[in-house]
Image (tube, rainbow, N blue to C red):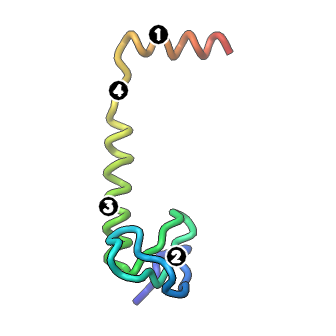
Amino acid sequence: MTLPPNTVEVKPENKCDVCREKDARYYNITHYIHICGIGCFEEFIVGYNREIEEISRKLLKPDETDVVRKKKDDL
């Protein structure tokens, strides 16, 4: 198995942060997660990207935009 970038092997002392069932064999130092295998890492990345897309799609309402601009001007 090819490890994802910035992933190191660890002792199986922690559970996988994705499936929470298996012992984690790897630790990804970019995302600070314990993973049991490439499948869980891919599942994590899909969910992570989905959250980023949802956050980026949210738009400020017009009245909230004015508040943000005012706060910037006050700085």
Label 2, label 4: how far apart the Cα atoms are: 35 Å
> In the drawing, what numbered circle is on residue 59?
4
Label 2, label 1: how far apart the Cα atoms are: 43 Å
Q: Residue at x 51, y 82 (%)?
A: 13
Label 1, label 4: how far apart the Cα atoms are: 13 Å
Q: Are marks 1 and 3 in contact (CB under 8 Å)?
A: no
- Residue 54: quarter of image: top left
| SS at mark 1 in the image | helix
Q: Residue at x 31, y 51 (%)?
A: 50
Q: Position of residue 32 (x, y in %)?
A: 53, 65
Q: Nearer the viewer, residue 17 or 51?
A: 17
| SS at mark 3 in the image | helix
Amino acid type, callout 3: Val
| SS at mark 2 in the image | strand
Q: Which residue is mark 3?
A: 46
Q: Which residue is mark 2?
A: 27
Q: Are marks 2 and 4 in contact (CB under 8 Å)?
A: no
Label 2, label 3: how far apart the Cα atoms are: 18 Å
Residues packed near mark 4 inside 10 Å, few (<14), some (14 to 19) or many (20 plus): few
Amino acid type, callout 4: Leu
Q: Which residue is mark 1?
A: 66
Q: Residue at x 40, y 74 (%)?
A: 16
Q: Position of residue 22 (x, y in %)?
A: 35, 81
Q: Residue furthest right?
A: 75
Q: Nearer the viewer, mark 2 or mark 4?
A: 2
Q: Residue at x 52, y 76 (%)?
A: 27
